[in-house]
Amino acid sequence: DADVTQTPRNRITKTGKRIMLECSQTKGHDRMYWYRQDPGLGLRLIYYSFDVKDINKGEISDGYSVSRQAQAKFSLSLESAIPNQTALYFCATSDGKGRRGRGPEAFFGQGTRLTVV
Amino acid sequence: GEDVEQSLFLSVREGDSSVINCTYTDSSSTYLYWYKQEPGAGLQLLTYIFSNMDMKQDQRLTVLLNKKDKHLSLRIADTQTGDSAIYFCAEIPNQAGTALIFGKGTTLSVSS
């Protein structure tokens, strides 16, 4: 089983619909992140959470909201989807500390490909 | 805000060396990273370097860090077709706790 699981893997939705992308992790990490990937733009941070009671906006939070239901679960919602939210969305986790001289490492899910028509 | 800059494309022949360059933003970034994304997959950590190092070698990979110029590079020796992927440079601008900030990614194409 994957350490970071995203559901769904693919989704097509209509403009104006509400949609939720879910992420769960078995790494036991406190920190979770949502990124979106667009061709030529790399990964941009949408929201991040350092523990269950902590939610922070990233670079491009407008049009999105998140919920940290538990340490292992972090969901991303599009309240009213629009076509320019068509992208590949990644969830990631990190313990933020690193160990044995290694820096903190982020572990990524396989991504959710969202298309808004 | 400032961006982590990378060239978007690199094309090499199998067996040649590949060099992917990156300019990062925060001179206080303690760790700098290279992630690899294969087609249809998520990102995987390829290697990293601590900011008090100038160079790190790991099998076919060599990372060079120039802190003065905030320049990071990844050299892949004897590039193989399986190395074709998107490579992302990333930093954590504030060790106290913001997320990884990524460059736009360099698409490496290896021809046989």
Image (cartoon, coloured by chain):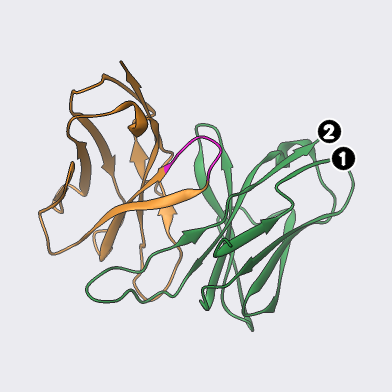
Rendered-image quadrant of the N terminus of chain A? bottom right
Q: Which residue has dot 1 on it? A: A15
Q: CA distance from mark 1 to mark 2?
A: 6 Å
Q: Is residue B91 above or below residue A75?
A: above
Mark sitting earlier along the chain (1/2): 1
In this rendered view, identify the residue nearer to me: A42 or B15: B15
Look at the image and tell me whether residue B8 can be seen: yes
Q: Judge the density around disc 2: few (<14), some (14-19), many (≥20) Cα neighbours within 10 Å.
A: some
Chain identifier of the orange chain: B
What's the magenta region? B37-41
Please tell me which residue is depicted at 53% across the width and 43% down the height of the picture: B41
Q: Amino acid at mark 1?
A: Thr
Which of the 4 image quarters holds residue A109? bottom right
Q: Which mark is residue A27?
A: none
Q: Are marks 1 and 2 in contact (CB under 8 Å)?
A: yes
Q: Main secondary structure of the magenta part?
A: loop
Left or right of A49 in this view: A18 = right
Residue A106 drawn at (x, y percent):
44, 62
- Residues indicated by labels 1 and 2 sit on the same polypeptide chain: yes
Q: In the image, is residue B74 part of the stretch drawn in magenta?
A: no
Residue A66 picture location, percent across and down: 71, 66
Chain A colour is green
Q: Classify mark 2: helix, strand or loop.
A: loop
> Label 1's element?
loop
Image height check: is A27 above or below B79? below
Query: Which numbered disc covers residue A117?
Result: 2
Coordinates of residue A33 in the picture (x, y in percent) = 56, 63
* Callout 1: chain: A
What's the residue type where badge 2 is placed?
Answer: Val
Q: Residue at x 44, y 68 (%)?
A: B98
Q: Chain of mark 2?
A: A
